Image: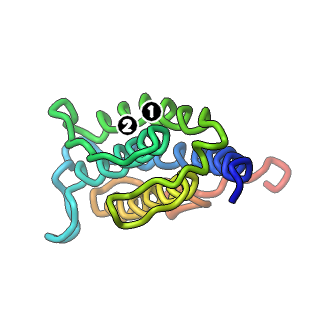
Amino acid sequence: MTPEMAQGAVQFLSHSIENEAKTTAKVLAAVPAGQEEYRPHEKSMAALELCWHTASTEVWFFNCIADGAFGPGGKMPENIKTAADVLAFYNEEHPKALARVRAMDAAACAKVIDFFGFMNVPAVVYLNLAANHAIHHRGQLSVYLRPMGVKVPGIYGPSGDEPMPMPAEAK
């Protein structure tokens, strides 16, 4: 992949990621206060842990991609107590981190980056991995919602709780 191709892929993927972030925010916003410790199974993360993992890892990925190197992620800060706190973090930090990736020059987009000895691929590949990771964990979190007693938002279309809006002419 040429640097120019990598930069084009970054620009293309970043628009999709921006749209996915709106859906992730919608799912985070649906997690009710008072259910932070809910987990569907003993092996599952608690709801707040899953919210934090989903939101913070995406931001971490973008910042590491922009830095050209992966380093350790951070623990959940003490001030994060609810999903609303995670959502506020996500709404503030996600756009800034994604903007850093979008601002990368062509050479940086194509630069091969080591991922803890597990793989060495161009930076642009990690952007796709970050998106897939976020979508995966958002899906897990959406499954927590109904047992927590709240409505499940539509993600790629309607849900049982959020019907598809109909155009006025179809009604």
Return the x and y of residue 167 as percentages of the image width and height.
Answer: 78, 50
Residue 68 vertical position relative to residue 123 in the rendered view, above or below? above
Q: Which residue is mark 1?
A: 91
Mark number for residue 87?
A: 2
Return the x and y of residue 101 as percentages of the image width and height.
Answer: 55, 39
Return the x and y of residue 140 as percentages of the image width and height.
Answer: 37, 64
Residue 91 vertical position relative to residue 68 in the rendered view, above or below? above
Q: Residue at x 71, y 54 (%)?
A: 2
Is 115 situated left or right of 149 in this image?
Answer: right
| Callout 1–callout 2 Cβ contact below 8 Å | yes
Please, which residue is most extreme toward the right here?
Answer: 169
Q: Which amino acid type is shown beneath numbered disc 1? A: Asn
Mark 2 neighbour class, 10 Å CA radius: few under 14, some 14 to 19, many 20 or more: many
Is 65 situated left or right of 144 in this image?
Answer: right
Q: Residue at x 73, y 53 (%)?
A: 5
Is 139 situated left or right of 164 in this image?
Answer: left
